Image (cartoon, grey):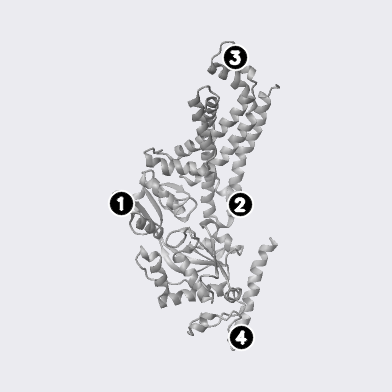
Amino acid sequence: MRIRHAGPTALLAASLLVLAACSSGTGDDTPSAAGTTDAMEEPTDGPTGAALPEGSTMAALADAGSITIGTKFDQPLFGLVGPDGVPEGFDVEIGKIIATELGLDPDTDIEWVETISANRETFIETDQVDIVIATYTINDTRKERISFAGPYYEAGQSILTLASDADINGPDDLAGKKVCTVTGSTPEANLLENFPDTEVVPFGAYSECIEPLRNGLVDAISTDNVILAGFAAQNDDLEVRGDPFTEEPYGIGLELDDTDFRMWIDDVLEKIFEDGRWVEAWEATAGTVLPTPEPPAVDRY
Amino acid sequence: MDVIVDNLPTYLSGFAMTARLTLISGVASLVVGTVLAALRVSPLRPLRAFATGWVDLLRNTPLTLVFFFAILVLPQFGVIITSFQGAAITCLTAYTSAFVCEAVRSGINSVGTGQAEAARAIGLTFGQSLTHVVMPQAVRSVVPPLINVIIALAKNTSVAAGFGVVELVASGRRIALANPGEAVIVLAGVALFYLVFTVPAGLLAGVVERRVAFSR
């Protein structure tokens, strides 16, 4: 228990240092030790164009010259690691942008770590990752253990079924149907709570639901629309039906109460919403099968 | 600990499913495994080959792959097991029966050749000598390894959690999702329910072993 208490204390000390640095050292804006190359390349007045505040998590990461980012390795369009071992997707692109803003090289200075839905909070709390960008829905229970920057995208739970199925056209048609989802996931909990007449069939991964759907063992698959859209794009016999019936704002997970870092990431996100890099990242990844949405409003709680 | 008490109904329904899978697959695999063992010592080559093939294939394949095969591959050939529970029981039985077969066969081999020869000499057929003379002696000596196999089966049922069956592990995951701060305790609760099943099974094994023990 003693070790666990050290974390918050250190954080408090660190944030006090940051405050002190802010109040005293506003005059000499010396570029920090790592010398943020980014600041040199584009001398904008934006919040991240300036040197990273000393003693902050951002400065520490820039000094270390590397950042560890947790993401999904099995999520098409967002975070998917192919046989070559290089992660690809929208989450990965957002991670690269953040690394770039820290003055790091997005191709060499990022260490990607696989985080699955069940271990994301733990990985942040035990410092195994610096941030998590992993189709990570912002919600209040999670906010008790970690902090969320963002959202940088808003997904919603939807339904995928066979193109030949005429019975299921939206969430209202799920009563009495078998719906496949992943065991221990938010969509599963949501189905159990809001669709009591639906038989929930939990599998280990969404991709494993497809064959049972084709064989008629289940009637539909339900999870976030972006995941389903990826499946529908790959398989002509599958279709997404109806509008999303939940709101799943995807955020970037970081250590609880590291407010400076959170605000800094929020600044970065707002900047890339503006300057087109967000759209660029989207169109290179998820945008290949999905329409480009409006960027969401960042929630600075 | 409150989280375990608060979610007791979910735990219990998961436990009931785990117990059901274990009992049905356990009984079925004891029967199938014993038959397979008999086939492996039969004088007919095709029967021996069939049983040997079954054991070699299923004993050496990871259980998860057996599940994938039954749920994702078999339907391609038109074999569709409509209930996920039925598919789980089929897979667990097929897999566990291979281990039961080998345990029973080791028992059969431990019965002296003279026993079988004497049985044949007094005019019993192969089947009669097996069922009346060899098997009763063989099964007694393999109670401990069979209990091992059944305990392993009880734990192996957790693989079904990834294939549409809501047993203990799947229930545990649901509870853990709703209580993200207490995942460790939730999983400890799952382990506890497995112990509720496996520890008494081990004790029962001890009792049965003493009952049927005989000196040779």
Q: Please state which amino acid type lies under the numbered disc 3.
A: Ala
Disc on res. A163: 1
Q: Position of residue B23 (x, y in %)?
A: 54, 33
Which residue has dot 2 on it? Answer: B185
Front label number (2 vs 4) = 4
Q: What is the crowding at mark 3: few (fewer than 14 residues within 10 Å), some, or many (at least 20)?
A: some
Which chain contains the residue that carries disc 1?
Answer: A
Q: Please state which amino acid type lies under the numbered disc 4.
A: Gly
Quarter residue B113 falls in: top right
Judge by depth and name the residue closer to the eye, A177 or B147. B147
- Is the Cβ of the residue at disc 3 closer than 8 Å to that at disc 4? no
Front label number (1 vs 3) = 3
Q: Secondary structure at mark 3?
A: helix
Same chain? Circles 3 and 4: no
Q: What is the crowding at mark 4: few (fewer than 14 residues within 10 Å), some, or many (at least 20)?
A: few
Same chain? Circles 1 and 3: no
At a point 52% along the width and 37% down the height, the residue shown is B58
Q: Position of residue B137 (x, y in %)?
A: 63, 21
At a point 46% along the width and 68% down the height, the residue shown is A93
Disc on res. B119: 3
Q: Please state which amino acid type lies under the numbered disc 1.
A: Ala
Disc on res. A25: 4
How many angstroms separate mark 1 from mark 3 (CA)? 66 Å
Front label number (3 vs 2) = 3
Same chain? Circles 3 and 2: yes
Same chain? Circles 1 and 2: no
- Is the Cβ of the residue at disc 1 closer than 8 Å to that at disc 2? no
- Is the Cβ of the residue at disc 1 closer than 8 Å to that at disc 3? no
Front label number (1 vs 2) = 1
Residue sitting farthest toward the front: B45
Q: Please state which amino acid type lies under the numbered disc 2.
A: Ile
Q: Secondary structure at mark 1?
A: loop
